[in-house]
Image (cartoon, grey):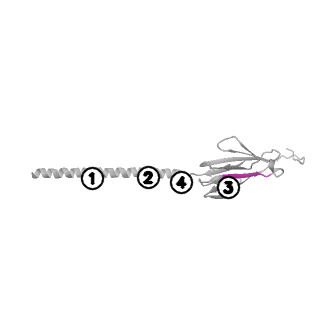
Amino acid sequence: AISERGCERTSKPNLELLEIEYTFENARHKIYIKDGIEVSLPWQSSNITLSFAVLDFTQPHLNQYKYTTGTTQEWTDLGNRNFINIIKPNIGVHNFKIQGANSEGVWSNIAEIKITVPPPFWKTTLANIIKILLIIGIIVIAVIRIRKRIEHQRQEIIEHERVMEQLERQQ
């Protein structure tokens, strides 16, 4: 591509990941990020904004951006908007690939970021194991109590029969 000064520009522009802003517990939080980083956000996070910029200031209003996620190979065109908004992220791992072009249409290398939103404790594997163990424990306790009650009733019947036999002998 040829710049407005008539010089040919062959190098790709740099795309920098800037920050992630999100709402958690009614407050805005900010994390400064870079390419290749992994970020974990609380499961209650909302209104996430992922910001980035092409470091070409010749005509920044003409810079273009696009992104894709790990769930699709299709790129979403952002035009000159240099951020992605996520209202309420799903629980799981979100792999974002972002690319930007300078005012001359030269695309940058792809920048990547992994955003993890872990499940709340009660939806984790450990919590499910604890729930299963509690259910098994309740069933075992119930079976033991039922067996004790049956054994107690059996003992009462045996005692009642013994008393009846003694009464019959006395008559």
Query: Does the residue at mark 4 contact the one at mark 2 (Cβ under 8 Å)?
Result: no
Q: Which mark is residue 134?
A: 2
> Which amino acid does the dot numbered 2 rest on?
Leu
Residue positioned 55% across, 53% down in the render: 120
Residue beneath disc 1: 152
Residue beneath disc 4: 121
Q: Is residue 109 visible?
A: no
The mark nearer the N terminus, 4 or 1, is 4
The mark nearer the N terminus, 4 or 2, is 4
Q: Which mark is residue 21?
A: 3
Distance between mark 3 and mark 2 Cα atoms? 39 Å
Main SS, magenta residues? strand
Q: Position of residue 88 (x, y in %)?
A: 62, 50
Distance between mark 3 and mark 1 Cα atoms? 65 Å
Q: Which mark is residue 95?
A: none
Rendering quarter of residue 33? bottom right
Q: Nearer the viewer, mark 4 or mark 3?
A: 3
Query: Does the residue at mark 1 contact the one at mark 2 (Cβ under 8 Å)?
Result: no
